[in-house]
Image (spheres, rainbow, N blue to C red):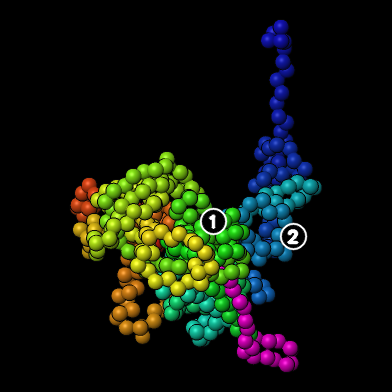
Protein backbone atom coordinates (compact mmCIF):
# COMPACT_ATOMS: atom_id res chain seq x y z
CA UNK A 1 0.00 0.00 0.00
CA UNK A 2 2.96 2.30 0.76
CA UNK A 3 4.21 1.80 -2.81
CA UNK A 4 1.00 3.35 -4.26
CA UNK A 5 1.16 6.49 -2.07
CA UNK A 6 1.64 9.82 -3.79
CA UNK A 7 4.96 11.42 -2.87
CA UNK A 8 5.44 15.14 -3.33
CA UNK A 9 8.84 15.75 -4.99
CA UNK A 10 11.14 18.00 -2.96
CA UNK A 11 13.50 20.43 -4.61
CA UNK A 12 16.39 22.31 -3.02
CA UNK A 13 15.74 26.00 -2.84
CA UNK A 14 18.03 28.29 -4.82
CA UNK A 15 18.59 32.02 -4.81
CA UNK A 16 20.47 34.44 -7.00
CA UNK A 17 23.91 35.71 -5.99
CA UNK A 18 23.66 39.40 -5.14
CA UNK A 19 26.92 40.11 -6.99
CA UNK A 20 26.94 38.02 -10.17
CA UNK A 21 23.35 36.77 -10.30
CA UNK A 22 24.00 33.03 -10.74
CA UNK A 23 21.85 30.40 -9.06
CA UNK A 24 23.27 29.12 -5.81
CA UNK A 25 22.31 27.46 -2.57
CA UNK A 26 21.19 30.07 -0.07
CA UNK A 27 23.69 31.20 2.60
CA UNK A 28 23.85 33.99 5.16
CA UNK A 29 25.95 36.26 2.90
CA UNK A 30 23.72 35.78 -0.23
CA UNK A 31 26.88 35.52 -2.32
CA UNK A 32 28.38 32.58 -4.21
CA UNK A 33 31.75 31.18 -3.13
CA UNK A 34 33.62 32.90 -5.98
CA UNK A 35 32.24 36.32 -5.15
CA UNK A 36 32.68 35.76 -1.42
CA UNK A 37 36.39 34.97 -1.93
CA UNK A 38 36.79 38.05 -4.11
CA UNK A 39 35.28 40.18 -1.35
CA UNK A 40 36.96 38.54 1.65
CA UNK A 41 40.47 37.00 1.99
CA UNK A 42 40.62 35.15 5.31
CA UNK A 43 44.38 34.55 4.90
CA UNK A 44 45.09 38.30 4.91
CA UNK A 45 47.46 39.10 7.74
CA UNK A 46 48.66 35.51 8.08
CA UNK A 47 52.36 34.86 7.54
CA UNK A 48 53.29 33.20 4.25
CA UNK A 49 57.04 33.09 4.96
CA UNK A 50 59.01 32.07 8.03
CA UNK A 51 62.62 31.29 8.96
CA UNK A 52 63.62 28.32 11.10
CA UNK A 53 67.03 27.40 12.49
CA UNK A 54 68.36 24.01 11.35
CA UNK A 55 71.42 22.14 12.63
CA UNK A 56 72.93 20.31 9.62
CA UNK A 57 75.11 18.06 11.79
CA UNK A 58 72.42 16.32 13.87
CA UNK A 59 69.42 17.26 11.67
CA UNK A 60 67.54 19.06 14.44
CA UNK A 61 65.47 22.28 14.55
CA UNK A 62 65.50 25.10 17.10
CA UNK A 63 62.36 25.42 19.16
CA UNK A 64 62.78 28.78 20.91
CA UNK A 65 64.29 29.67 23.18
CA UNK A 66 66.93 26.90 23.49
CA UNK A 67 65.32 23.53 22.78
CA UNK A 68 66.46 21.54 19.75
CA UNK A 69 63.98 19.08 18.21
CA UNK A 70 65.31 16.19 16.11
CA UNK A 71 63.02 15.38 13.15
CA UNK A 72 63.29 13.90 9.67
CA UNK A 73 62.03 15.66 6.53
CA UNK A 74 58.27 15.31 5.94
CA UNK A 75 57.82 13.59 9.29
CA UNK A 76 54.90 14.04 11.64
CA UNK A 77 57.18 15.68 14.21
CA UNK A 78 58.46 18.24 11.69
CA UNK A 79 54.91 19.08 10.51
CA UNK A 80 53.83 19.68 14.12
CA UNK A 81 56.90 21.88 14.66
CA UNK A 82 56.15 23.97 11.54
CA UNK A 83 52.51 24.50 12.49
CA UNK A 84 53.47 25.56 16.04
CA UNK A 85 55.70 28.28 14.59
CA UNK A 86 52.46 29.90 13.27
CA UNK A 87 50.62 29.53 16.56
CA UNK A 88 49.90 33.27 16.95
CA UNK A 89 48.48 33.53 13.40
CA UNK A 90 46.29 30.45 13.72
CA UNK A 91 44.47 31.97 16.69
CA UNK A 92 42.59 34.17 14.19
CA UNK A 93 41.33 31.22 12.09
CA UNK A 94 40.44 27.55 12.56
CA UNK A 95 43.00 25.07 11.19
CA UNK A 96 41.38 22.21 9.25
CA UNK A 97 44.30 20.43 7.59
CA UNK A 98 48.07 20.69 7.07
CA UNK A 99 50.34 18.79 4.68
CA UNK A 100 53.78 19.06 3.10
CA UNK A 101 54.37 20.14 -0.49
CA UNK A 102 57.39 18.37 -2.00
CA UNK A 103 60.53 20.48 -2.47
CA UNK A 104 64.08 19.66 -3.50
CA UNK A 105 65.97 18.13 -0.56
CA UNK A 106 68.87 20.58 -1.04
CA UNK A 107 66.75 23.69 -1.68
CA UNK A 108 66.78 24.77 2.00
CA UNK A 109 63.02 25.25 1.71
CA UNK A 110 60.05 23.54 3.38
CA UNK A 111 56.54 24.23 2.07
CA UNK A 112 53.41 23.45 4.08
CA UNK A 113 49.89 23.73 2.68
CA UNK A 114 47.36 24.85 5.30
CA UNK A 115 43.57 24.73 5.01
CA UNK A 116 41.77 27.15 7.35
CA UNK A 117 38.21 28.28 8.08
CA UNK A 118 36.83 31.59 9.34
CA UNK A 119 33.44 33.18 9.90
CA UNK A 120 32.88 36.08 7.49
CA UNK A 121 29.89 38.21 6.43
CA UNK A 122 26.71 37.62 8.43
CA UNK A 123 28.04 34.41 10.00
CA UNK A 124 28.91 32.57 6.75
CA UNK A 125 31.93 30.22 7.13
CA UNK A 126 34.57 30.41 4.40
CA UNK A 127 37.27 27.76 3.86
CA UNK A 128 40.51 28.63 2.10
CA UNK A 129 43.95 27.08 1.49
CA UNK A 130 47.32 28.80 1.38
CA UNK A 131 51.01 27.84 1.35
CA UNK A 132 53.61 28.80 3.93
CA UNK A 133 57.26 28.67 2.88
CA UNK A 134 59.89 28.04 5.56
CA UNK A 135 63.50 29.00 4.86
CA UNK A 136 66.09 26.78 6.59
CA UNK A 137 68.93 28.76 8.11
CA UNK A 138 71.88 26.60 9.12
CA UNK A 139 72.92 27.06 12.71
CA UNK A 140 74.73 24.40 14.73
CA UNK A 141 73.26 23.42 18.08
CA UNK A 142 75.30 23.74 21.27
CA UNK A 143 76.39 20.11 21.45
CA UNK A 144 77.49 20.05 17.79
CA UNK A 145 79.32 23.34 18.24
CA UNK A 146 81.29 21.94 21.16
CA UNK A 147 82.06 18.78 19.22
CA UNK A 148 83.24 20.67 16.14
CA UNK A 149 85.47 22.90 18.26
CA UNK A 150 86.99 19.89 20.02
CA UNK A 151 85.85 16.38 19.04
CA UNK A 152 87.31 14.98 22.28
CA UNK A 153 85.29 17.35 24.44
CA UNK A 154 82.86 15.06 26.22
CA UNK A 155 80.59 15.62 29.19
CA UNK A 156 79.91 12.02 30.28
CA UNK A 157 81.72 8.73 29.71
CA UNK A 158 80.71 5.11 30.32
CA UNK A 159 83.58 2.75 31.15
CA UNK A 160 82.35 -0.79 30.45
CA UNK A 161 84.54 -3.58 31.84
CA UNK A 162 84.52 -7.35 32.33
CA UNK A 163 87.37 -9.04 34.22
CA UNK A 164 87.86 -12.07 31.95
CA UNK A 165 90.56 -13.20 29.51
CA UNK A 166 88.39 -13.02 26.35
CA UNK A 167 86.05 -10.58 24.59
CA UNK A 168 83.15 -12.89 23.66
CA UNK A 169 80.74 -10.89 25.84
CA UNK A 170 81.69 -7.61 24.16
CA UNK A 171 81.19 -9.09 20.68
CA UNK A 172 77.66 -10.04 21.69
CA UNK A 173 76.96 -6.69 23.40
CA UNK A 174 78.20 -4.85 20.30
CA UNK A 175 75.51 -6.54 18.20
CA UNK A 176 72.80 -5.75 20.76
CA UNK A 177 73.89 -2.11 20.86
CA UNK A 178 73.77 -1.91 17.06
CA UNK A 179 70.32 -3.50 16.82
CA UNK A 180 68.77 -1.15 19.39
CA UNK A 181 70.81 1.96 18.40
CA UNK A 182 71.74 2.28 22.05
CA UNK A 183 74.98 4.19 21.34
CA UNK A 184 73.60 6.46 18.63
CA UNK A 185 74.43 9.57 20.70
CA UNK A 186 78.01 8.51 21.46
CA UNK A 187 80.54 10.99 20.03
CA UNK A 188 83.41 8.52 20.39
CA UNK A 189 83.84 4.82 21.16
CA UNK A 190 87.23 3.49 22.18
CA UNK A 191 88.35 -0.10 22.69
CA UNK A 192 90.18 -0.61 25.96
CA UNK A 193 91.87 -3.51 27.70
CA UNK A 194 89.09 -5.72 29.16
CA UNK A 195 86.39 -3.37 27.95
CA UNK A 196 85.09 -0.44 25.91
CA UNK A 197 84.75 3.29 26.68
CA UNK A 198 81.77 5.30 25.38
CA UNK A 199 81.86 9.12 25.37
CA UNK A 200 78.75 11.32 25.25
CA UNK A 201 78.13 15.06 24.94
CA UNK A 202 75.21 14.90 27.38
CA UNK A 203 74.85 13.24 30.77
CA UNK A 204 71.27 12.13 30.03
CA UNK A 205 72.46 10.17 26.98
CA UNK A 206 75.06 8.37 29.10
CA UNK A 207 72.45 7.58 31.77
CA UNK A 208 70.11 6.16 29.16
CA UNK A 209 72.92 3.98 27.78
CA UNK A 210 73.74 2.66 31.27
CA UNK A 211 70.06 1.78 31.77
CA UNK A 212 70.19 -0.20 28.52
CA UNK A 213 73.22 -2.14 29.77
CA UNK A 214 71.37 -2.99 32.99
CA UNK A 215 68.61 -4.60 30.92
CA UNK A 216 70.89 -6.86 28.84
CA UNK A 217 73.67 -7.91 31.24
CA UNK A 218 74.23 -8.50 34.98
CA UNK A 219 76.03 -5.27 35.88
CA UNK A 220 76.94 -3.07 38.78
CA UNK A 221 77.90 0.57 38.45
CA UNK A 222 79.42 3.56 40.18
CA UNK A 223 79.05 7.21 39.23
CA UNK A 224 81.56 9.96 39.82
CA UNK A 225 81.98 13.55 38.70
CA UNK A 226 84.88 15.95 38.33
CA UNK A 227 84.60 19.73 38.48
CA UNK A 228 85.77 21.34 35.23
CA UNK A 229 84.88 25.00 35.76
CA UNK A 230 82.94 27.25 38.11
CA UNK A 231 81.45 30.70 37.50
CA UNK A 232 80.98 32.47 40.86
CA UNK A 233 79.01 35.32 39.27
CA UNK A 234 76.00 33.17 38.37
CA UNK A 235 76.91 30.25 40.66
CA UNK A 236 77.11 27.71 37.78
CA UNK A 237 79.25 24.57 37.78
CA UNK A 238 80.47 22.42 34.89
CA UNK A 239 81.23 18.78 35.62
CA UNK A 240 82.49 15.76 33.74
CA UNK A 241 80.63 12.59 34.70
CA UNK A 242 82.00 9.05 34.61
CA UNK A 243 79.91 5.90 34.88
CA UNK A 244 81.95 2.80 35.76
CA UNK A 245 79.98 -0.29 34.73
CA UNK A 246 81.28 -3.78 35.49
CA UNK A 247 79.79 -6.90 33.91
CA UNK A 248 79.70 -10.17 35.84
CA UNK A 249 82.72 -12.38 34.95
CA UNK A 250 80.37 -15.37 34.63
CA UNK A 251 80.03 -16.25 30.92
CA UNK A 252 78.03 -18.75 28.94
CA UNK A 253 79.46 -22.33 29.05
CA UNK A 254 81.49 -21.61 32.21
CA UNK A 255 81.71 -24.29 34.89
CA UNK A 256 80.87 -22.85 38.33
CA UNK A 257 81.19 -24.15 41.87
CA UNK A 258 78.45 -22.38 43.80
CA UNK A 259 79.25 -21.10 47.30
CA UNK A 260 77.37 -23.13 49.94
CA UNK A 261 75.07 -20.25 50.87
CA UNK A 262 74.14 -19.66 47.22
CA UNK A 263 73.52 -23.37 46.62
CA UNK A 264 71.22 -23.53 49.67
CA UNK A 265 69.31 -20.40 48.57
CA UNK A 266 68.71 -22.06 45.18
CA UNK A 267 67.31 -25.25 46.72
CA UNK A 268 70.60 -27.17 47.12
CA UNK A 269 71.46 -26.79 43.43
CA UNK A 270 74.73 -28.30 42.24
CA UNK A 271 77.18 -27.30 43.56
CA UNK A 272 78.88 -27.92 40.16
CA UNK A 273 76.69 -26.16 37.58
CA UNK A 274 77.00 -24.86 34.01
CA UNK A 275 76.07 -21.34 32.93
CA UNK A 276 73.76 -21.81 29.93
CA UNK A 277 72.64 -18.24 29.28
CA UNK A 278 73.51 -14.71 30.40
CA UNK A 279 71.06 -11.80 30.03
CA UNK A 280 70.23 -9.48 32.91
CA UNK A 281 69.95 -12.79 34.81
CA UNK A 282 72.36 -15.74 34.92
CA UNK A 283 70.85 -19.14 33.98
CA UNK A 284 72.49 -22.09 35.80
CA UNK A 285 71.99 -25.78 34.92
CA UNK A 286 72.94 -28.82 36.97
CA UNK A 287 74.19 -31.27 34.27
CA UNK A 288 73.55 -34.31 36.47
CA UNK A 289 69.95 -33.55 37.57
CA UNK A 290 68.82 -31.11 34.80
CA UNK A 291 67.63 -28.61 37.42
CA UNK A 292 67.77 -25.00 36.28
CA UNK A 293 67.83 -21.83 38.39
CA UNK A 294 68.31 -18.14 37.72
CA UNK A 295 70.47 -15.62 39.56
CA UNK A 296 69.51 -11.94 39.35
CA UNK A 297 72.26 -9.29 39.52
CA UNK A 298 71.59 -8.47 43.20
CA UNK A 299 71.97 -12.12 44.20
CA UNK A 300 75.18 -12.50 42.23
CA UNK A 301 76.92 -9.31 43.37
CA UNK A 302 76.03 -10.11 46.99
CA UNK A 303 78.44 -13.08 46.88
CA UNK A 304 80.45 -12.19 43.75
CA UNK A 305 81.89 -15.65 43.01
CA UNK A 306 83.95 -16.58 39.95
CA UNK A 307 83.99 -19.45 37.48
CA UNK A 308 85.81 -22.66 38.31
CA UNK A 309 86.77 -23.20 34.65
CA UNK A 310 86.11 -21.06 31.59
CA UNK A 311 85.68 -21.69 27.88
CA UNK A 312 89.43 -21.25 27.35
CA UNK A 313 90.00 -24.51 29.31
CA UNK A 314 87.66 -26.67 27.20
CA UNK A 315 89.21 -29.99 26.10
CA UNK A 316 88.18 -31.98 23.01
CA UNK A 317 87.07 -35.60 23.50
CA UNK A 318 86.27 -38.47 21.15
CA UNK A 319 82.95 -40.21 21.87
CA UNK A 320 83.08 -44.04 21.64
CA UNK A 321 79.78 -45.19 23.12
CA UNK A 322 76.46 -43.54 24.04
CA UNK A 323 73.78 -45.19 26.18
CA UNK A 324 70.60 -43.14 26.73
CA UNK A 325 69.25 -43.49 30.29
CA UNK A 326 66.31 -41.02 30.33
CA UNK A 327 63.60 -39.60 28.07
CA UNK A 328 63.89 -36.15 26.54
CA UNK A 329 63.46 -33.20 28.93
CA UNK A 330 62.61 -29.61 28.00
CA UNK A 331 64.42 -27.25 30.36
CA UNK A 332 63.97 -23.52 29.77
CA UNK A 333 63.20 -24.04 26.07
CA UNK A 334 66.22 -26.29 25.48
CA UNK A 335 66.07 -30.07 25.01
CA UNK A 336 68.28 -32.45 27.00
CA UNK A 337 68.60 -36.24 27.27
CA UNK A 338 70.65 -37.91 30.03
CA UNK A 339 73.09 -40.53 28.76
CA UNK A 340 76.13 -42.52 29.89
CA UNK A 341 79.00 -41.99 27.46
CA UNK A 342 82.48 -43.38 27.01
CA UNK A 343 85.01 -40.75 25.97
CA UNK A 344 88.74 -40.17 25.72
CA UNK A 345 90.88 -37.12 25.11
CA UNK A 346 91.66 -36.58 21.43
CA UNK A 347 95.33 -36.19 22.34
CA UNK A 348 95.49 -39.17 24.73
CA UNK A 349 93.71 -42.51 24.28
CA UNK A 350 95.50 -44.03 27.25
CA UNK A 351 92.66 -43.18 29.65
CA UNK A 352 88.95 -43.83 29.00
CA UNK A 353 86.31 -41.91 30.94
CA UNK A 354 82.81 -43.19 31.69
CA UNK A 355 80.66 -40.16 32.50
CA UNK A 356 77.03 -39.08 32.57
CA UNK A 357 76.06 -36.15 30.37
CA UNK A 358 73.00 -34.12 29.44
CA UNK A 359 73.94 -34.16 25.72
CA UNK A 360 72.50 -37.60 24.89
CA UNK A 361 70.15 -36.06 22.28
CA UNK A 362 72.98 -34.81 20.02
CA UNK A 363 75.94 -37.14 20.72
CA UNK A 364 76.49 -40.42 18.94
CA UNK A 365 79.51 -42.75 18.61
CA UNK A 366 82.19 -41.20 16.41
CA UNK A 367 81.37 -37.58 17.39
CA UNK A 368 83.61 -35.19 19.21
CA UNK A 369 82.62 -33.15 22.25
CA UNK A 370 84.10 -30.28 24.23
CA UNK A 371 84.20 -30.57 28.01
CA UNK A 372 86.09 -29.75 31.17
CA UNK A 373 88.79 -32.19 32.32
CA UNK A 374 88.37 -32.32 36.10
CA UNK A 375 90.48 -35.50 36.27
CA UNK A 376 93.71 -33.74 35.31
CA UNK A 377 92.83 -30.18 36.38
CA UNK A 378 94.55 -28.54 39.33
CA UNK A 379 91.75 -26.58 40.98
CA UNK A 380 92.62 -24.06 43.68
CA UNK A 381 89.09 -22.92 44.38
CA UNK A 382 88.10 -21.85 47.88
CA UNK A 383 84.42 -22.61 47.29
CA UNK A 384 85.19 -26.17 46.16
CA UNK A 385 87.23 -26.80 49.31
CA UNK A 386 84.21 -25.93 51.49
CA UNK A 387 82.34 -29.08 50.38
CA UNK A 388 83.24 -32.22 52.31
CA UNK A 389 82.95 -35.65 50.66
CA UNK A 390 81.89 -34.12 47.33
CA UNK A 391 82.14 -36.60 44.45
CA UNK A 392 83.61 -34.69 41.51
CA UNK A 393 83.04 -36.20 38.05
CA UNK A 394 86.14 -36.77 35.97
CA UNK A 395 84.69 -35.04 32.90
CA UNK A 396 81.77 -32.64 32.37
CA UNK A 397 80.81 -32.36 28.69
CA UNK A 398 79.54 -28.95 27.57
CA UNK A 399 78.71 -29.14 23.86
CA UNK A 400 79.26 -31.06 20.66
CA UNK A 401 82.39 -30.18 18.70
CA UNK A 402 82.40 -29.55 14.93
CA UNK A 403 86.04 -28.50 14.67
CA UNK A 404 87.11 -31.49 12.56
CA UNK A 405 84.33 -30.94 10.03
CA UNK A 406 84.95 -27.20 9.91
CA UNK A 407 88.49 -27.80 8.65
CA UNK A 408 87.01 -28.49 5.18
CA UNK A 409 85.39 -25.01 5.10
CA UNK A 410 88.30 -23.05 6.51
CA UNK A 411 88.89 -19.89 4.50
CA UNK A 412 85.49 -19.92 2.77
CA UNK A 413 83.21 -16.91 3.30
CA UNK A 414 79.92 -17.21 5.15
CA UNK A 415 76.58 -16.35 3.51
CA UNK A 416 75.99 -13.85 6.33
CA UNK A 417 77.85 -11.07 8.09
CA UNK A 418 77.60 -8.77 11.10
CA UNK A 419 77.93 -5.01 11.37
CA UNK A 420 80.32 -3.38 13.82
CA UNK A 421 80.57 -0.15 15.79
CA UNK A 422 82.85 2.66 14.64
CA UNK A 423 85.43 2.10 17.34
CA UNK A 424 88.95 3.39 17.92
CA UNK A 425 91.19 0.35 18.23
CA UNK A 426 94.22 0.08 20.44
CA UNK A 427 97.06 -0.27 17.89
CA UNK A 428 99.80 -0.47 20.53
CA UNK A 429 99.06 -4.11 21.39
CA UNK A 430 100.93 -5.59 18.45
CA UNK A 431 100.22 -8.33 15.94
CA UNK A 432 99.78 -11.09 18.53
CA UNK A 433 96.87 -9.24 20.12
CA UNK A 434 95.19 -8.78 16.73
CA UNK A 435 95.50 -12.48 15.95
CA UNK A 436 93.96 -13.31 19.33
CA UNK A 437 91.06 -10.94 18.61
CA UNK A 438 90.48 -12.54 15.19
CA UNK A 439 90.46 -16.01 16.75
CA UNK A 440 87.97 -15.00 19.44
CA UNK A 441 85.73 -13.29 16.86
CA UNK A 442 85.74 -16.46 14.75
CA UNK A 443 84.73 -18.46 17.84
CA UNK A 444 81.88 -15.99 18.42
CA UNK A 445 80.65 -16.47 14.83
CA UNK A 446 80.71 -20.24 15.32
CA UNK A 447 78.70 -19.87 18.53
CA UNK A 448 76.06 -17.95 16.57
CA UNK A 449 75.87 -20.74 13.98
CA UNK A 450 75.56 -23.46 16.62
CA UNK A 451 73.12 -21.69 18.94
CA UNK A 452 69.84 -20.34 17.43
CA UNK A 453 68.84 -18.93 20.80
CA UNK A 454 72.02 -16.84 20.95
CA UNK A 455 71.33 -15.16 17.58
CA UNK A 456 67.61 -14.66 18.27
CA UNK A 457 68.07 -11.06 19.48
CA UNK A 458 70.71 -10.12 16.89
CA UNK A 459 70.53 -8.83 13.31
CA UNK A 460 72.41 -10.93 10.74
CA UNK A 461 72.77 -9.63 7.17
CA UNK A 462 73.22 -11.28 3.80
CA UNK A 463 76.77 -11.29 2.50
CA UNK A 464 76.81 -9.87 -1.03
CA UNK A 465 80.29 -11.34 -1.63
CA UNK A 466 79.00 -14.90 -1.14
CA UNK A 467 78.68 -16.59 -4.55
CA UNK A 468 75.84 -19.05 -5.41
CA UNK A 469 78.39 -21.62 -6.52
CA UNK A 470 79.94 -21.54 -3.08
CA UNK A 471 76.51 -21.91 -1.51
CA UNK A 472 76.03 -25.18 -3.30
CA UNK A 473 79.51 -26.43 -2.51
CA UNK A 474 79.27 -26.04 1.25
CA UNK A 475 76.01 -27.99 1.55
CA UNK A 476 77.72 -31.29 0.93
CA UNK A 477 75.70 -33.39 3.34
CA UNK A 478 77.65 -32.77 6.58
CA UNK A 479 75.87 -31.72 9.76
CA UNK A 480 77.89 -28.58 10.52
CA UNK A 481 75.46 -25.95 11.89
CA UNK A 482 74.76 -22.92 9.74
CA UNK A 483 72.43 -19.92 9.75
CA UNK A 484 69.27 -20.43 7.61
CA UNK A 485 68.92 -17.87 4.82
CA UNK A 486 65.41 -16.90 5.98
CA UNK A 487 66.92 -15.48 9.19
CA UNK A 488 69.14 -13.04 7.28
CA UNK A 489 68.28 -9.39 6.64
CA UNK A 490 69.08 -7.47 3.49
CA UNK A 491 71.95 -5.03 4.05
CA UNK A 492 70.53 -1.83 2.56
CA UNK A 493 73.23 0.71 1.77
CA UNK A 494 72.28 3.70 -0.40
CA UNK A 495 74.69 6.38 -1.47
CA UNK A 496 73.57 10.02 -1.54
CA UNK A 497 73.31 9.97 -5.36
CA UNK A 498 71.16 6.82 -5.37
CA UNK A 499 68.98 8.24 -2.60
CA UNK A 500 68.43 11.42 -4.58
CA UNK A 501 67.56 9.50 -7.75
CA UNK A 502 64.96 7.47 -5.88
CA UNK A 503 63.34 10.64 -4.56
CA UNK A 504 63.18 12.10 -8.10
CA UNK A 505 61.48 8.96 -9.40
CA UNK A 506 58.87 9.13 -6.64
Figure quadrant of the N terminus = top right
Classify mark 1: helix, strand or loop.
loop
The answer to if 77 sits in the magenta stretch is: no
Classify mark 2: helix, strand or loop.
helix
Residue, far front? 389
The vertical placement of 163 against 284, above or below, is: below
Who is closer to the viewer here, 115 or 326? 326
Task: Locate residue 35, reporting x and y percent.
Answer: 67, 48
Examine the residues drawn in magenta and state their main secondary structure: strand
Residue occupied by mark 2: 91
Is residue 452 visible in the rendered image? The answer is yes
Stretch in magenta:
219-238
Residue at 33 percent across and 44 percent down: it is: 323
Residue at 51 percent across and 51 percent down: it is: 291
Badge 1: how crowded within 10 Å, few (<14), some, or many (20+)? Answer: many
- Disc nearer the start of the sequence (2/1): 2
Measure how far apart labels 2 and 1 are at the Cα level: 70 Å
Task: Locate residue 337, reporting x and y percent.
Answer: 41, 45
Who is closer to the viewer here, 296 or 24? 296
Residue occupied by mark 1: 269
Residue 242 occupies quadrant? bottom right
Amino acid sequence: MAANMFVVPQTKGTVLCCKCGILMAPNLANMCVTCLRSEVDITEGLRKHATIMHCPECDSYLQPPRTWLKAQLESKELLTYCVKRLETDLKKVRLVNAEFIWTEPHSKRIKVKLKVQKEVLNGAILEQSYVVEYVLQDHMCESCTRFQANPDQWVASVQLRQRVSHRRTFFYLEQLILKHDAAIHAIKIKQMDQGIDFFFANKSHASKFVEFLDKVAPTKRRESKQLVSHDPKNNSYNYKYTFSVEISPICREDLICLPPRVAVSLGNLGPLVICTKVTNNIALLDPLTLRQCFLDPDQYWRYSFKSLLGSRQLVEYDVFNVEVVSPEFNVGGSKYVMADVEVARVTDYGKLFYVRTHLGHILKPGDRALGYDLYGANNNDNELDKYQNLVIPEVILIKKSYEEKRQKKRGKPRPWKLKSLEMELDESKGRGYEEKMDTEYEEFLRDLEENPELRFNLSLYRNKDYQPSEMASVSDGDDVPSVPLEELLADLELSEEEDGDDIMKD
